[in-house]
Amino acid sequence: MGTAFVDNIKEHSTGHGVQIPGHVIQFVQKTSSTVITQANNNSLVSFGLSQAFTPKSATSTIFLMANVAGEHYGSHTDRGLRFDFTKDGSQIRYWPYMDYHSNDNSQNISTQTLLHSESAGNTSTRTYEVRFCCTSSSNSTGRINNYNAPSRLVIMEIAQ
């Protein structure tokens, strides 16, 4: 087997990129410093981490990573934060208990990292989003980006 030495690799077809298995084809990030407070409500809501993305190859793996600055407090015995990832408005991954506390009145401030991967499947544009809510609908408050902002969504396309 020989060795190829190159100084420059150029794509053959414009817009398709160079695809080497295991390497990143695209890297897109979105940040949000929007402070959202949700009290006594366990319905998932948006907070500004939404990003359109168009894969270059249907066979790629799409890797999502979010780092979210969260906080929760209140007197309810089932208290914490919930998160999800959506693709074009449909839930693709759900975390029902993040930074969960079962029985105290403390304020909890944290930064949560959320990960998900899936096959691109096609090269159609899609929109990924991160949402959050409280785990309880009474005596519970959740807040995003009040401390440790901004929150960040990273989308990577990995060649296969």
Image (cartoon, helix red, strand yellow):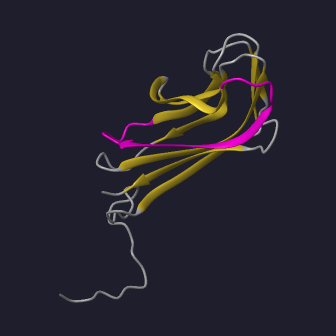
> What span is colored magenta in the figure?
102-125
- The residue under the point 80% across, 29% down is 106
Q: Residue furthest front?
A: 103
How many numbered callouts? 0
Residue extending farthest to the left is 1
The one of 33 and 143 positioned closer to us in this rendering: 143
Foreground pick, 2 / 10: 2
Whether residue 61 sits left or right of residue 134 in the image: it is left
Q: Residue 136, relative to residue 128: is it above or below? A: above
Q: Is residue 133 left or right of residue 28?
A: right
Q: Position of residue 31 (x, y in %)?
A: 68, 44
The residue sitting at the top extreme is 138
Q: Is residue 31 visible?
A: no
Q: Nearer the viewer, residue 73 or 155?
A: 73
The quadrant in which residue 13 appears is bottom left
Point out residue 92 in the picture as x, y percentages from the top left corner. Answer: 43, 30
Q: What residue appears at the point 74 percent right and 44 percent down from the top-left corner?
A: 150
Residue 68 image point, x, y percent: 66, 40
| Residue at 38 percent of width and 37 percent of height | 124
In magenta stretch: residue 139:
no
Q: Quadrant of the C terminus?
A: bottom left
Residue 117 sits in quarter? top left
Instruction: Please provide percent x and percent y for residue 119.
Output: 33, 43
Inspect this view and state whether residue 131 appears: yes
User: Which quadrant, please, contains the N terminus?
Assistant: bottom left
Residue 111 lies within the magenta run: yes
Residue drawn at point x = 50 percent, y = 33 percent: 127
Q: Is residue 137 above or below residue 15?
A: above
